[in-house]
Amino acid sequence: MSDPTLLVLSSLAEGDKHGYAMMQDIETFAGIRLGPGTLYGAITRLESEGWIRPTGLKTRRQPYTITPSGRAHLQKELAELQQIVKVGLSRMKHA
């Protein structure tokens, strides 16, 4: 799974984070290092979809939070991935 959208949403599902903390978290749980352009491009898209939003805290680094619609989108996408994994693993047993 290397879709930056799902990686960012998965990171924020655990709690609010700023960009650098998301980059570190994603590298830890997914083994993928997102560059700043990729990360902030995903953040911009996620904000425009209404799936994340800034927390409103006035700090040097802007933390983001996942919205209820972002959580629902993440849950839907992960369920679809889970189905793909289930079928793929099942088919591997027959190969």
Image (cartoon, grey):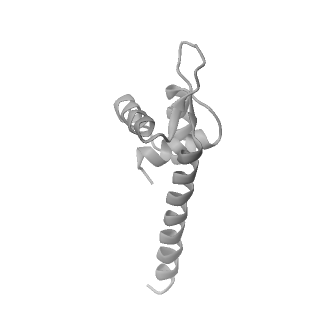
Judge whether 91 appears above or below 69 on screen.
below
Number of numbered tags placed on the structure image: 0
In the picture, the quarter occupied by the C terminus is bottom left
- The residue closer to the viewer here, 59 or 32, is 59
Find the residue positioned furthest to the right. 14
Residue beneath the point at 54% across and 74% down: 86
Residue beneath the point at 52% across and 40% down: 26
Q: Is residue 38 left or right of residue 16?
A: left
* Image x and y of residue 51, in percent: 50, 42
Q: Is residue 68 left or right of residue 3?
A: right
Judge whether 63 appears above or below 10 on screen.
above
Asked if residue 29 can be seen in this view, the reply is no
User: Residue 68 is drawn in which quadrant?
Assistant: top right
Asked if residue 25 can be seen in this view, the reply is yes
* Image x and y of residue 54, in percent: 53, 27
* Image x and y of residue 85, in percent: 51, 69
In the picture, the quarter occupied by the N terminus is bottom left
Residue beneath the point at 47% across and 39% down: 50
- The residue closer to the viewer here, 14 or 85, is 14
* Image x and y of residue 45, in percent: 38, 38
